[in-house]
Amino acid sequence: MTPLLTAEAVTVRYGSLVALDAVDLRIPLGQRHALIGPNGAGKTTLLDVVAGATRPTAGRIRLGGRDVTGLGPAARARRGVGRIHQRPAVWGSLTARQNVLVAALPRAERPGRWHPTARRRAAGHTADALLDRVGLGDVAATPAGQLAHGQRRQLEIAVALAGRPRLLLLDEPAAGLSTVETGWLVEFLRRLPRAVAVLLVEHRLDLVYALCDTVTVLRDGRTLATGSPAEIRSSGPVRQAYAEGVT
Ligand SMILES: Nc1ncnc2c1ncn2[C@@H]1O[C@H](COP(=O)(O)OP(=O)(O)OP(=O)(O)O)[C@@H](O)[C@H]1O
Ligand SMILES: [Mg+2]
């Protein structure tokens, strides 16, 4: 079967720095895949390339077999790519609800069939349901800029889900979260329907092993290993790479 996401020999150069060097990645529908590796390994760069935010110097990205290398972030989002950033990215001056609404509206479009009011109502229902689902129902009317870090993380998840992604890119979603918030996040991600595939960048291996079916280890822009959590856990080179450089 055609994988949901294929990265083929993706290379990203910044001047003389090679951030990614011919990296391959294959994620089937519904798979939970982790991307781990030391600081500067190229993990965020690979998410940028998959999301369409960075154009690779060489290589191709396919979604469902279709070459999307030339498409930008908005077009990738329409094709089902959702993203959680390393630092929560929400509109600070908009309320939590408005943030989700902005993401839900395009998905509520039914050209020629629906009146704009009906569309707004449908998007409103989606936004309210998602805010409840991530536990932000009580702060729906609060400007996102006034929310605590953990709440902004929850909001960004709701915004990403409002776009109905088939592939969710998560860049260190547990960073800066308390133990309780991290527990919530893990439980939430475990319960995500399998219709949503996940590509998770995470330093905490306990979270990776709790959430993911497969793991790719990057170091200095190269793939060091890909395999099941058990295979990765017992890999000598991986343990060495970790001992050398994770903060
Ligand atoms: N826009 C850019 N211009 C120049 N160099 C960049 C740019 N973005 C990333 N880099 C470099 O590319 C390399 C990979 O960076 P990247 O952010 O992908 O690493 P990472 O694996 O996400 O690290 P971390 O675990 O610290 O988040 C680093 O050496 C970084 O300094
Ligand atoms: Mg990063």
Image (spheres, rainbow, N blue to C red):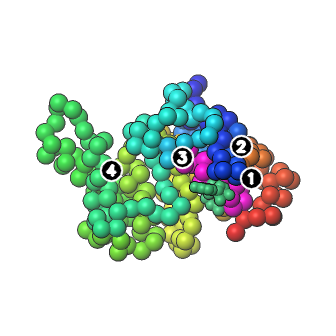
Residue 37 found in image quarter: bottom right
Question: Which residue type carries mark 3?
Answer: Thr
Give residue 30's position: percent from left, percent from top. 54, 39
From this view, report whether residue 46 is shown above or below residue 203: above
Residue kind at label 1, given as amino acid type: Asp
Q: Which residue is mark 2?
A: 21
Nearest-to-viewer mark from 4 and 3: 3
Number of residues whose C-alpha sits closer than 10 Å to that of mark 1, classed few (under 14), some (14–19) or many (20 or more): some
User: Residue visible at 39% across and 62% down?
Assistant: 90
Query: Does mark 3 have its CB less than 8 Å from ligand 1?
Result: yes
> Can you tell me which quadrant of the image ligand 1 is in?
bottom right
Q: Which mark is residue 103?
A: 4
In the picture, measured across the screen, residue 198 lies left or right of residue 104, that is right
Inter-mark Cα distance, 1 to 4: 35 Å
Name the residue that disc number 1 marks: 220
Furthest-right residue in this view = 236
